[in-house]
Structures are given as structure tokens and as C-alpha cells.
Amino acid sequence: MKLVTYDIAGRRGIGALKNDAVIDLTAAGLPASMRELIAGGAALLQSAARIEKPVLPLKGLHLLAPVPDPQKVVAIGLNYMDHCREQNVAVPTKPLVFAKFPSSIIGPEAPIYYDPALTNQVDWEAELGVIIGKRARNVKRAEALSYVFGYTPLNDVSARDLQFGDKQWVRGKSLDTFCPFGPAITTADEIPDPQKLHIYSRVNGMTMQDSSTSEMIFPVDELVAFLSNAFTLEPGDVIATGTPNGVGVFRTPKVFLQNGDRVEIEIENLGVLLNPVVTTA
């Protein structure tokens, strides 16, 4: 099942995406919040799967990030072998963890804004987003995937001048609008192996990243176990699992996002996330 959060005429709800339509789960009696649906567990998800109407046309719906209000977004750096190779850096021996503030979240089609007076090195990063399905603390790796609710395309937008100038990553990766994800969550039952997904990014139709989640150094199950042994993961929390090679800062010459650009993140079986880029004064 592919689940979305929508807004229509000021009413927010959740739905199941079916071709060019959305089954309105909220109008059928389910919660208006994706976090509530996730926290409801398997029984609530099974109820959602049985609902067939009412149906809303997808055209005209304003889709938000599937989880607009997670408690936290946990991100992983240097987690693809090909990304390490393009930088000529050592492969990490344990996950490199940082945070993206939830205030950076936007959904599909929403603009990525940046102020050129603050940064002029804005970069893209195609990532597999992992949505946590139940409270996870001290989870064993063998059980870790049972704590995953689903997966979504995510763009870890990064202001490289701030990231490298600060010598830490949070500010440069947490500017407002710097965490687009969606358009939908694909539930985990439809993705038997998250390490076998093709992952792409495109800027203005040109392919920039073309890789596979098989290149991950620390796979999803290891990340969930590692993170949950440090802090509690809550239903609806998002893990941004790292990006493959092909980002702008390591190209020759370097390439950064400009006003009017259109960025697409595509992951096999999960859909395409599209966001325009807009500069502000």
C-alpha cells in the first residue's frame, strides 16, 4: 500500500494512493494523522487496506510530506561505498549520525527555498527514507526490519558551504525546506529487501545519481539496531539512510542548484519526488 498525507480546501487527511486517485481513509473514519495511523499498528493498517471509498482524484490534491510532523529525522553520512570512492575517503567503521530538524520538512512539488546571501552551494542527495513503525529501543539486528513501517524517497538537501564551513553538518542540512520527502510511504510488506532498490536523482531531467541501495555500507536493519541502542525511535520517525555518488559538490566542475531548477529523486517501486528550486532575498 502507498500512503499519503493530503490537504484539500484546508482539510488535512491521509489516504491510500491508487493510480490517479486517493482513497480517503480519513473520511472513512481513520485518523487524519499519519503518525496516528502508524502508531495504531497492524490492526489499523489492515483496516486501511480494506477501505475502498470515498475516492478523491489525485489531480487537485495538495500532497504534503507523508509524515509532516515526525518527532525526529535521523540522518546518516557517508553510507554508500560509491560515495566514499568519489570523495576518496576512508569507509566508516560505524554509522556517522546527524540530525535534520523537522522544520526542514516539505512534501512533493513544494519549493526548496534558499537565500543566496546565506548559501550559494546548495546540493542534492537522493536517499532512501525509512519510516519507523513502532517504538524501538535496544532492537536486535535480526528483528530490526519488523520495526520499519515503510519507505519513501527523500532528498537530503545540503548547503555545502555551511556544512563544511561549520565543521559539523546540522545547520547546513536543516535549513527550512531542506528535507523534502514523499510523495508516499510504500509499506514495508511491498519491499521485501530494501537493499535491492535502484536509486536516482535528476536535475532538470539530467541524471546525476544512478546507483543501488546495495551500495549501502550499513544496511537498514543495521541502522535501526544501531540507532535504537543509542536512543528511542518512535512511530513516524524518519531515518535518511545516506546518498550514493553523483552529488554536485564532488563533480568537476562543481554543480549546485540554481533558481528555477527542478530536482527529482526516484527510487525503484517507491515513486518520484519532485521539487522546484527558488531563491529568496
Image (tube, grey):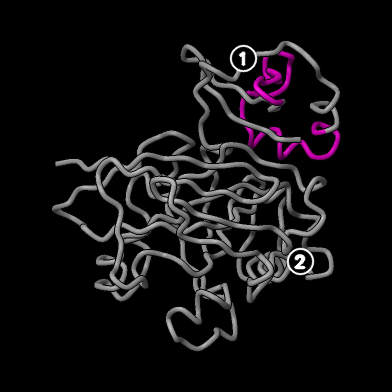
Where is residue 47? Give x, y as percent. Answer: 84, 26
In this view, the residue in front, 177 or 142, is 177
**Residue 116 in the image: above or below residue 9:** below
- Residue 57 tag number: 1
Q: Which mark is residue 49?
A: none
Which of 4/32 is in front? Answer: 4
Pointer 2 local density, CA inside 10 Å: few below 14, some 14–19, many at least 20: many
| Magenta run includes residue 268 | no
First to last magenta residue range: 19-45
Which residue is located at x 71 percent, y 35 percent?
Answer: 2
Looking at this view, name the residue that lies furthest to the bottom.
90
At 83% from the left and 64% from the top, the residue drawn is 143
Residue labelled with disc 2 = 139
Quarter holding the C terminus is: top left
Location of residue 9 with respect to 88 vertically, above or below:
above
- Of residues 108 and 144, the one nearer the viewer is 108
Q: Is residue 80 left or right of residue 198?
A: left
